Image (tube, rainbow, N blue to C red):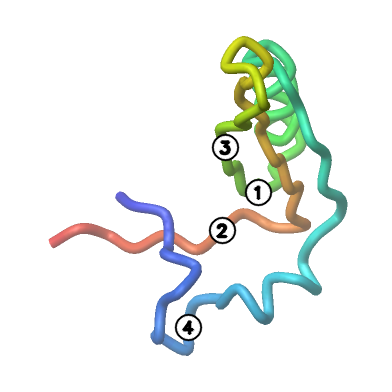
């Protein structure tokens, strides 16, 4: 199984444009432990989520890092069966 690509042209699956109405909230996290807590909570509640990561670059290479954008959805994303 694979999660639906948000840029899918299949009308049966939500697109990035229609996904906005399905968003419960978005939070920015800085640690993997926080991400795992949010993923676990979404799974427990039977809700879907979208997770994106960003590499932050500072003026000093030591100030950079990774930030995660966690978006909680009010439903589980559609899935397609692989052939």
Q: Secondary structure at mark 2?
A: loop
Residue that label 2 marks: 77
x then y, percent, for residue 46: 69, 42
| Residue 47 percent coordinates (x, y) | 71, 46
Q: Earlier in the sequence, mark 1 or mark 3?
A: 1
Q: Mark 2 or mark 4: which comes first in sequence? A: 4
The residue identified by callout 3 is 53
Could you classify mark 4 by the number of other residues whose Cα lies within 10 Å: few (under 14), some (14-19), or many (20 or more)? few
User: Quadrant of the rendered structure where residue 73 is?
Assistant: bottom right
Q: Which of disc 2 and disc 3 is earlier in sequence?
A: 3
**Disc on res. 12:** 4
Name above or below for residue 42 compared with residue 10. Answer: above
Checking the image for residue 48, the label placed there is: 1
The secondary element bearing badge 1 is classed as loop
User: How far separated are the C-alphas under marks 2 and 4?
Assistant: 11 Å
- Image-quadrant location for residue 44: top right
Q: Residues within 10 Å of mark 3 (few under 14, many from 20)?
A: few
Q: In 3D space, how far apart are the residues under numbered discs 2 and 1 (Cα atoms)?
A: 6 Å
| First in sequence: mark 4 vs mark 1 | 4
Secondary-structure class at tag 4? loop
Q: Residue 57: horizontal and vertical position, in percent?
A: 60, 30
How far apart in space, not on screen, are marks 4 and 1 (Cα)? 17 Å
Do the numbered discs 2 and 1 sit on residues whose CB atoms are within 8 Å? Answer: yes
Q: Secondary structure at mark 3?
A: strand
Disc nearest the viewer among 3 and 4: 3
Q: Residue at x 77, y 67 (%)?
A: 22
**Of tags 3 and 2, which is closer to the observer?**
3
């Amino acid at each position: 199984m694979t999660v639906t690509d948000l840029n899918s042209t299949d009308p049966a699956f939500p697109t990035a444009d229609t996904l906005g109405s399905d968003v419960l909230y978005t939070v920015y996290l800085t640690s993997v432990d926080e991400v795992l807590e949010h993923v676990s909570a979404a799974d427990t509640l039977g809700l879907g989520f979208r997770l994106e990561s960003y590499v932050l670059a500072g003026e000093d290479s030591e100030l950079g890092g990774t930030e995660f954008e966690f978006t909680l959805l009010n439903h589980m994303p559609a899935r397609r069966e692989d052939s």
